[in-house]
Amino acid sequence: MSAGQSYETKVMRTQTFSQLIDKYIEEEIAKTSSNYKSWLGQLLWRKEQLGYLTLNNVREDVISTARKNLQNTPDRFGKLQA
């Protein structure tokens, strides 16, 4: 396989992005961290938006589209999140 070429494994075709986020939250984020709530909120948003995808379908264009949708969504004060 040459550099930059993508490949898929059985795990990438069966595990969802949601499962990966749950595992990351459980194993990697220290609940005592000062940034815990911020990280958790960001991860849960990503899980809500992209969690249904299997890992082999989480691509740059999909993430970019989700990010653009977030930027066009008003925050709790009615301002765009640019």
Image (spheres, grey):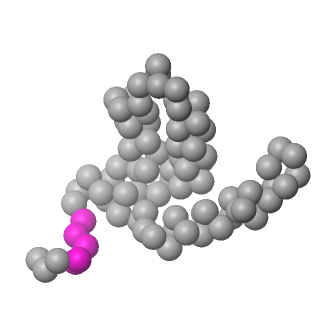
Residue 27 at least partly seen: yes
In the rendered picture of this protein, how many numbered marks are placed on residues?
0
Residue located farthest toward the front when viewing the structure as drawn: 34
Which residue is located at x 72 percent, y 62 percent? 82
Which residue is located at x 83 percent, y 44 percent? 76
Q: Position of residue 20 (x, y in %)?
A: 38, 44
Residue 16 shown in magenta: no
Q: Is residue 20 above or below residue 35?
A: below
Q: Is residue 56 left or right of residue 33?
A: left
Q: Nearer the viewer, residue 17 or 67?
A: 67
Q: Position of residue 2 (x, y in %)?
A: 13, 80
Residue located farthest toward the left when viewing the structure as drawn: 1
Q: Is residue 6 left or right of residue 45?
A: left
Q: Is residue 7 above or below residue 20?
A: below
Residue located farthest toward the right when viewing the structure as drawn: 78
Q: Nearer the viewer, residue 47 or 13?
A: 47
Q: Is residue 80 above or below residue 37?
A: below
Which image quarter holds the N terminus?
Answer: bottom left
Which residue is located at x 55 percent, y 50 percent? 46
Point out the stretch of residues depicted in magenta.
4-8
Main secondary-structure element of the magenta-colored stretch:
loop
Q: Nearer the viewer, residue 16 or 38?
A: 38
Q: Position of residue 22 (x, y in %)?
A: 43, 36
Name which quarter of the figure residue 30 lies in: top left
Q: Nearer the viewer, residue 12 or 28?
A: 28
Which residue is located at x 23 percent, y 56 percent? 10
Residue 40 at least partly seen: no
